[in-house]
Amino acid sequence: MSHPKAATEFLKDQANSQWHDETLWMIRDKRDASSKSIPEWEELRNLASEIKDNVLSNLDKYLEQFEAQALKNGIKVHWAKDAKEHNEIVLTILQEKNCEAIVKSKSILTEECHLNPYLEKQGIEVVDTDLGERIVQFLHQPPSHIVMPAIHLKKRDISALFHEKLQTEKGNEDPTYLTNAARLHLREKFLGAKVAITGVNFGIAETGEFLVCTNEGNADMGVHLADTHIACMGIEKIIPRRKDLGVFLRILARSATGQPITNYSSHFRSPAKGKEIHLVLVDNGRTRQLAREKFKNSLKCIRCGACMNTCPIYRRSGGFSYGSTVPGPIGSILSPGLDMKKYSTLPFASTLCGSCSDVCPVKINIHEQLYEWRQEITKHHGAVGKGLSMKLASGIFKSPLAYQFSGSLMRKVIKSLPKSVIYNPLNIWGKSRDLPKAPKESFQDWYKRNRHE
Amino acid sequence: MSSREEILNSIRGIQKENKALPDIPNFQLEGDLVALFKSAIQANKGEILGKKEFENWIASTNFQHIISCSEAFHTYATQELPDDAHQLDHLELAILEVQFGVAENGAMWLDDSQLPHRALPFITEHLVLILSEENLVSNMHQAYDRIGSDHSGFGLFIAGPSKTADIEQSLVIGAHGAKSLRVVLL
């Protein structure tokens, strides 16, 4: 599915798509207000970016240090070169524990590895415990946003869904009522699970500890009640020192939702008595991305979602239109690195306005990388659609005579062009666009007429 | 070759310009720490109480299941700690002491030494945290300075009650963890 086609689907429900656009912009506004309350905000962005630069240039050393410290702390460390190996490692641990039902908190990495369907095929019940993720899981959908997984849904949809799945009152759309129903349903799951899976926000090389940040407290409810905690972490999530967290925890939640910090920031260093922590370190294309000089900066991402909230295309096309695990601007520079052909339309789903780069808390040059990916894709797959018209335009601009002639022609043609030429199904450009009013004369003619006055 | 070696070798094989690790300046926060902390907690949908207000509040409730890990408020406990955290499911109130609070964002630090069960502040219906005004730091940089190289198996910043906005961005307090957070500032 290409981005424009999928976006067309999303835009069919005009009221919903307008709500989506406005709501994400409201979150962008909250991010602005929150960041402006910190005088050193720009300095923090620079620091975060520099710390991540240092990580990327010493990733092997930090990973070794992190592993050594984690082992010393009693954490069991596993390495997975790809999604398949990651899923197999998780399954092996579950089989060792005779575990048939797990609870899972938000992890974009496990989405990327398609862990849920893999485990479900093996007969394991997987329960996503973040409220938004549980909602989309009930609907057999992936999350449409990395911070707000169910942002594409309205409360009437969720009310109908919970009526079916959790036997809530028909037509009761009160968010507090619906959330409480999910609380009771998931409480049972927490109390029954022997193994809990989480993602990782940051891994600290110096101490071997790792952080999980949530507002709901679902990650902690899961892991502290289970006997075994499996944490799945992309290798780029390393930071060198504990004190670097001072920088990252100040920018993460502010960039994501405008909150000063998530309500829970949990630091896991060693398992509680009688329990186990397993950490799975996953590559899955990250070392390949690191080797691409132009694109390696994309690995600095801390998954705040700010680039999605600000993006005029994401806001108006929805997360599903990208067809990738991570949607939006950052997803459009990460995904082609995984599969350039499959995700070839994503770098074009951008106005290149640069707003994504402006809000990025680790200063990834997202819009520049989008532009770079366009060139890579065009080189590999050839120009599509616009090729002929661009060649024609190039010829016209090269010759002054052709330029003058085509200009006067267009001023006449635009006026008399039948509407059917612009607004027909073959002309994609004509969708939601209007032709400009043609001026009576060219600028050159106007200047000649007026220069003496 | 193991996956570990494969991953590390492919990273080693990439030509990388060495970028230095920056020093983090000693950022400060202007203003009265107590006032800033109070407004941060309120913004996070928590509540601030003095000792007297707390005592009045607890007298007005009818909780049957209270665990207190605070020396100062030990008399409010109605039960001892169970061995298994699953038995905390019906807990109505947990009273815990914290090590320090952060004025800038309302976050409060606890580690295994304040948490006889790591699940305690999450599984309880309501949570009360006890903090002394002397133990306020300005921002997260000072927070990590204060933690220093302390070694605890688990450490936690709590900044508010459990919350979610996953249904149409409507804020709901009490997703999975504590439905309310009160901070008793001494």
Image: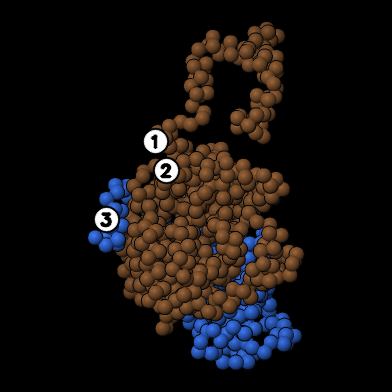
Chain colours: A brown, B blue
Q: Residue at x 62, y 45 (%)?
A: A9
Circle 2: is it few (<14), some (14-19), or many (20+) Cα within 10 Å? Answer: some
Crowdedness near tag 3: few (<14), some (14–19) or many (≥20) residues, C-alpha within 10 Å = few
| Residue A340: mark in rendering | 2
Q: Which residue is mark 3?
A: B9
Image location (x, y in percent) of residue A304: 53, 56
Alpha-carbon span between mark 1 and mark 3 = 28 Å
Chain letter for mark 2, please. Answer: A
Residue A98 falls left or right of residue B77: left
**Which is more foreground, mark 1 or mark 3?**
1
The amino acid pointed to by label 1 is: His
Q: Which chain letter matches label 3?
A: B
The image shows residue B54, relative to residue A146, as above or below, that is: below
**First reached walking from the N terminus: tag 1 or tag 2:** 2
Foreground of the two, A31 or A111: A111
Q: According to the image, label 1 marks what residue?
A: A380
Q: Are marks 1 and 2 on the same chain?
A: yes
Q: Residue A383 appears at what percent x and percent y?
A: 46, 31
